[in-house]
Amino acid sequence: MKPLPFYDVLDVLIKPSSLGAGTAQRFQQEKYFIFALTPQQVREVCISRDFLPGGRRDYMVQIQLRFCLSETSCPQEDNYPNSLCIKVNGKLFPLPGHAPPPKNGVEQKRPGRPLNITSLVRLSSAVPNQISITWAPEIGKTYSMSVYLVRQLTSPLLLQRLRMKGIRNPDHSRALIKEKLTADPDSEVATTSLRVSLMCPLGKMRLKVPCRAVTCCHLQCFDAALYLQMNEKKPSWICPVCDKKATYESLIIDGLFLEILNDCNDVDEIKFQEDGTWCPMRPKKEAHKLQAPVPKVEGESEASVPVRHTAPSDSGVKKADVIDLTADSSDEEESDPPLKKRCVYMTKSQEPELHPKRYSGFEDCREYAVPAVPASLSSISMSCPRTQRQCAPSGVGI
């Protein structure tokens, strides 16, 4: 089977064993396997035990069950048979993760993973352990199972091992740059430079340990520590740049990028030239000018700065609406008065033309003005004979 980067195999408890040839039977098949632990193996498992909250236990040294296809052409990855059911010492072992929903009425297979069955194993050298496996056979496919005693590793330890493999010579990367920038006689477009980022595509942070797989054709690197941490939680081993397989065994640390990171601490992007040299891509000076504050002219005061008022103009051109929260509501009413009928006021010179005099015996209308102080009753009767006649008793002649 294919080795797992985060596990070191200590012993083989059950060698890869076939579950049986696939037949056309519809019924599930069942098979039993037995293994026993030595005193040394029991001791290693018990020493690595760690008690977690809630009564749970975790083991750094584990008993691991794996399934794969029975193929000898190349190392096989973990692969579960259909309708898999596992019992260890008579207890049902729950498969990790969630099963994918059925598609078109067909049950979908779970992604293959190694199974840690340590919690159900009898940690004793005197009592053997039994594993019961039930599965649905598939025509043309044969599966195998195996049991191992393994030690779980961490991402910092894998990073340390990656450093111990050594750093790739910078000349390898320079040769790859020249190869990519070499003009192709059959191509109409020639590439004279190549821009590469110094930021990790995983964490969007500056690279610390630049690495990539030897199977990748690109120059862009990713951070080895972040890549290992990601695969420690959910192993996929997919390159974040080209989305191709990038296994742990194929990872290398790029020596050229290490030199660039040590020489340039204030840039996030570089440009490679045709001869393999590089130069930092710094921001343009215009960008700094736009961000710099405008210098104040000597002798200039705040009062000299023109202030634009937002009062409405009589030109009739509509300007931007400005709402003044300090203005009174009466100001808004005065700014747009309602349409009313205009009153005509006459001057003294216009009065004879509009209203000619009806009484020729009077020269001025001021003679008819009502006095400001009320007159006595006797004066009213004498000055207004018409009123007196109206007030006379009935039957009295005038």
Image (cartoon, rainbow, N blue to C red):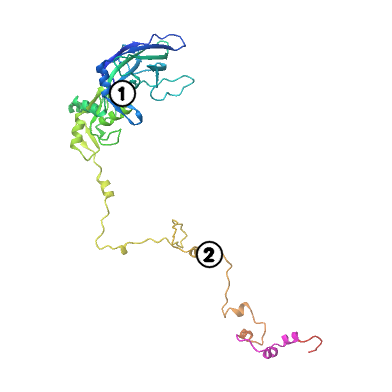
**Disc 1, SS:** loop
Residue 395 placement, left or right of 133: right
Which one is in front in this view, the residue at disc 2 or the one at disc 1? 1
Residue 186, numbered circle = none
Q: Amino acid at mark 2?
A: Pro
As rendered, which of 65 and 58 lies closer to the eye? Answer: 58
Bounds of the magenta span?
372-391
Residue at the extreme front: 126
Q: Residue at x 61, y 86 (%)?
A: 373
Residue 75 placement, left or right of 109: left
For the C terminus, give its image quadrant.
bottom right
For the N terminus, give its image quadrant.
top left
Return the x and y of residue 120 as percentages of the image width and height.
Answer: 35, 20
Prevailing secondary structure class for the magenta stretch in the rendered image: helix
Q: Which residue is mark 1?
A: 245
Return the x and y of residue 256 as percentages of the image width and height.
Answer: 19, 30
Q: Residue at x 67, y 90 (%)?
A: 379
Q: Which residue is mark 2?
A: 337
